[in-house]
Image (tube, rainbow, N blue to C red):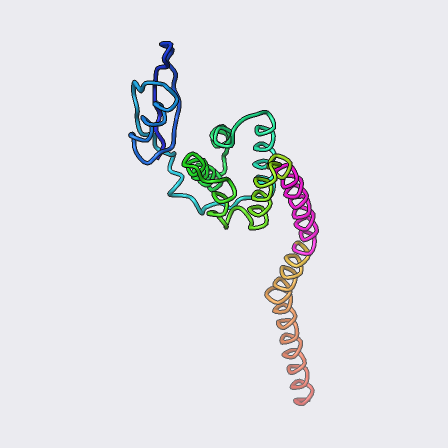
Amino acid sequence: MEYSYKAMRQNGETFEGTFIAESQRDVVEMLKRSKSYPIHIEEKQLVGTRDITFLKGVKAQELSMFCRQLASMLKAGSTISRSLDIMRRQITNKRLLETVTTIHYDVQKGVVLSEALSRHPKVYPVFMVYMVESGEMSGTIDVVLDRLAVYFEKSAKINNKVKSAMVYPAVLLVVSISVVFFLVNFVLPTFRIHVRVEQCLNCLLLRKLCWR
């Protein structure tokens, strides 16, 4: 659950923020660790993300942006937890928003990023988890995320090219089916009527000849 809080620092300065925790007690403990005193704590509602988690998938372009933004903030000296907190406020994809929110919560509890990502295999590919894990072990996670951003960006471009290449055959197929449908339902019945009329006329002519 996400909580909004208002607290006061030791110098008397008040500030506000949000924190993901299992209970208000966890929020209080977090504030105490930062040598601050809680004034007000209230549970926030997550704009209904859990009801529509699987309505949308996550595109390669969105994963590219996720990796690039996270890498940029880490290079700037931000922590992973703080970076995820900033990013989740800017995400519009509902499915990605829920996973980032959950990952942020897991990281706050002490779970490493690679393990938090691995808990969402339908969104974050296995190879991405392994690469992040190798970056954590070597201390180059920002470099790894940059490389992942480039990879997902190229994947998005390839997917767009494939989709564009498939447009013409799809249009051609639809047009062909439409033409066949028109011929079978409108043109051929007209020919049949003409043939039957011609047959009837021939029959009448033959009868007249026979009567003569």
Q: Magenta region's main secondary structure?
A: helix
Q: Quadrant of residue 73?
A: top right
Q: Is residue 192 above or below residue 77?
A: below
Q: Residue at x 38, y 34 (%)?
A: 47
Residue closest to the far front:
138
Task: Residue 183: say if magenta.
Answer: no
Q: Is residue 58 above or below residue 203?
A: above
Q: Nearer the viewer, residue 6 or 144?
A: 144
Position of 84 with respect to 167 (left or right) is: left
Where's the N terminus, which quadrant? top left
Position of 95 with respect to 126 (left or right) is: left
Q: Residue at x 63, y 79 (%)?
A: 200
Q: Is residue 60 above or below residue 180?
A: above
Where's the C terminus, which quadrant? bottom right
Q: Which residues are magenta?
A: 145-170
Position of 43 with respect to 166 (left or right) is: left
* x, y percent for residue 89: 47, 29
Residue closest to the far top:
12
Q: Residue at x 59, y 25 (%)?
A: 76
* x, y percent for residue 158: 68, 47
* x, y percent for residue 66: 56, 36
* x, y percent for residue 64: 61, 39
Q: Nearer the viewer, residue 88 or 15?
A: 15
| Number of marks | 0
